[in-house]
Image (tube, grey):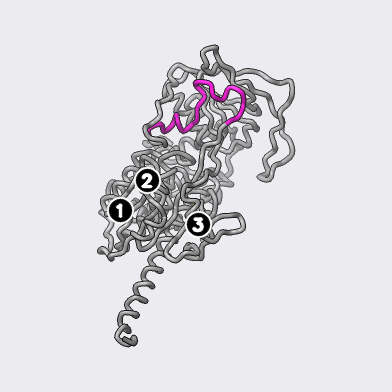
């Protein structure tokens, strides 16, 4: 949708559209809104009595209510309603897989396009960041909480706690705060300025953000437990997957994150930028990170940006909007191909990717067909730069030894009660450590629940202390 044009109004069942048409439409739907187009898009909501979009949202966001406010132009009220259920809505609206959650549940999805819920949420939160009055937090209550990790769950927990008057310190190992959110993973479409605004707001409200913490060295769990009244463990531990094929160490073969976020990723000092201007860039993988690499390579002047994916286009895991954006930037794709080696020059620079074609095999546990290499179909794609965007694997965490004393589930994850407290009183955990990897909204939900659990636990502790002090004089001297 062009910002100066009104939103299209649905008129019954449209004729079937090609994938390219749908992609173009998705790009428009997710384009930036202004006040007029936001109101028009929100007005498409049917205000369903039984709103499936709400049940599709892990946070239970009151979507029809804030869409109605948006349609009437009450943007600050609409933003406040979103914030009541979500501490980081402007951040969630970017990486949240809304196409699989609220938007896929929207009744309009089966007839035409669903309401652009995520893009509207983002518009509202950007509006609120510019126009809303500062948050009024409770006065300091004298209690201190450490939050380990600075991703969405950690920041949501800190936001809730500081509202209740806690002194909160957020620790992370990254050189730049915001954890995996700013430093890689599923949120690469997120604008850095949005994260920075949110961090600045938290700092302004008294949250201390400590970057570059070295677990087990500068900070141990034991010292943090001694210094703070409660601790929330909200970190994840992931490492980018590599490809063990001949030529993997050639110059020009690198990780996607080294290209996308060289100034943010570990280790310090920052990595040298990967130059793609005028070069033939090949990206291996089919997720959002791969799409982001392709789009940004084209925007940075790459002569060609080619994506290689081992399954068919229909099984691409990337969000449709990320795929559409990569296509719109001029990226091209080869489907059903699998790299088997990288070719190189005598000087050790990559010159191409040797591939084999695949065919769909038996269904894997996730329902997608296993890609089976077809012998004799090998060919080489020329390349000056190859970026690996193959996802992430769990990485060993330096605090693992200290965490070993905590109870675990049968899958080996930390066991917590309904308030997210681990087997050690005062030590809380959520997100990946408890559930495994998941969407950012689930991390936010955990962060909010942990803050509530911490508040409840410390309030009860204070009540017990007061009761004990009032009966001290009764104790035998
Ligand atoms: S399901 Fe779609 S149309 Fe119905 S209330 Fe939710 S956003 Fe509106």
Q: Is mark 1 within 8 Å of ligand 1?
A: no
Identify the magenta region: 243-263
- Judged by depth in the image, the label closer to the viewer, 3 or 2, is 2
Quadrant occupied by the N terminus: top left
Expressed as whole percent of the image width and height from the top left, the position of residue 382 reads 57, 16
Identify which residue is drawn at 64% across, 31% down. Answer: 310
Q: Is mark 3 within 8 Å of ligand 1?
A: yes
User: Mark 2, residues whose alpha carbon is within 10 Å: few (<14), some, or many (≥20)?
Assistant: some
Label placed on residue 54: 3
Residue at mark 1: 207
| Residue 262 included in the magenta stretch of the image | yes
- Does the rendering let one see residue 398? yes
Label placed on residue 108: none
- Judged by depth in the image, the label closer to the viewer, 1 or 3, is 1
- Judged by depth in the image, the label closer to the viewer, 2 or 1, is 2
User: Mark 1, residues whose alpha carbon is within 10 Å: few (<14), some, or many (≥20)?
Assistant: many
Residue at mark 2: 213
Q: Earlier in the sequence, mark 3 or mark 2?
A: 3
Expressed as whole percent of the image width and height from the top left, the position of residue 295 reads 47, 28
Q: Is residue 93 shown left or right of residue 390? A: left
Quadrant occupied by the C terminus: bottom left
User: Mark 3, residues whose alpha carbon is within 10 Å: few (<14), some, or many (≥20)?
Assistant: some
Mark 2 to mark 1 CA distance (whole Å): 16 Å
Magenta span: predominant SS is: loop
> Is the Cβ of the residue at disc 3 closer than 8 Å to that at disc 2?
no
């Amino acid at each position: 949708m062009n910002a100066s044009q009104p939103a299209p109004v649905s008129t019954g069942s449209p004729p079937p559209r090609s994938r390219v048409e749908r992609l173009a439409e998705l790009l428009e739907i997710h384009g930036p809104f202004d006040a007029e187009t936001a109101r028009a898009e929100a007005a498409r909501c049917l205000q369903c009595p039984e709103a499936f979009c709400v049940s599709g949202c892990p946070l239970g966001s009151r979507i029809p209510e804030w869409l109605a406010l948006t349609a009437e132009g009450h943007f600050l009220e609409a933003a406040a309603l979103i914030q009541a259920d979500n501490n980081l809505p402007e951040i969630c609206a970017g990486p949240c897989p809304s196409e699989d959650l609220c938007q896929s549940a929207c009744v309009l999805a089966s007839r035409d396009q669903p309401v652009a819920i995520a893009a509207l949420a983002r518009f509202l939160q950007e509006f609120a960041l510019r126009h809303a009055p500062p948050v009024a937090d409770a006065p300091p209550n004298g209690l201190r909480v450490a939050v380990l990790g600075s991703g969405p769950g950690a920041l949501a927990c800190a936001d809730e706690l500081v509202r209740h008057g806690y002194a909160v310190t957020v620790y992370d190992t990254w050189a730049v705060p915001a954890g995996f959110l700013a430093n890689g993973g599923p949120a690469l479409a997120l604008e850095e300025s949005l994260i920075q605004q949110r961090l600045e707001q938290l700092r302004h409200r008294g949250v201390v953000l400590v970057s570059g913490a070295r677990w087990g060295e500068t900070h141990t769990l034991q010292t943090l437990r001694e210094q703070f009244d409660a601790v929330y463990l909200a970190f994840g531990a992931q490492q980018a997957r590599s490809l063990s094929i001949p030529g993997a160490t050639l110059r020009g073969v690198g990780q996607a994150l080294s290209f996308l976020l060289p100034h943010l990723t570990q280790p310090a000092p920052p990595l040298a930028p990967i130059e793609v201007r005028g070069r033939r860039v090949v990206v291996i993988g089919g997720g959002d990170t791969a799409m982001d690499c392709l789009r940004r390579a084209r925007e940075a002047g790459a002569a060609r940006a080619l994506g290689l994916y081992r399954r068919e286009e229909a099984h691409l895991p990337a969000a449709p909007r990320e795929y559409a954006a990569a296509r719109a930037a001029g990226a091209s794709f080869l489907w059903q191909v699998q790299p088997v080696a990288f070719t190189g020059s005598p000087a050790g620079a990559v010159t191409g990717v040797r591939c084999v074609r695949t065919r769909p095999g038996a269904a894997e546990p996730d329902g997608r067909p296993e890609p089976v290499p077809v012998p004799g179909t090998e060919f080489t794609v020329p390349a000056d730069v190859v970026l690996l965007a193959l996802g992430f694997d769990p990485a060993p965490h330096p605090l693992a030894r200290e965490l070993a004393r905590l109870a675990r589930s049968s899958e080996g994850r930390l066991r917590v009660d309904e308030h997210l407290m681990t087997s050690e009183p005062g030590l809380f955990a959520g997100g990946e450590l408890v559930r495994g990897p998941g969407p950012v909204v689930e991390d936010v939900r955990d962060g909010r629940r942990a803050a509530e659990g911490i508040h409840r636990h410390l309030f009860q502790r204070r009540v017990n202390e007061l009761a004990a002090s009032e009966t001290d004089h009764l104790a035998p001297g």
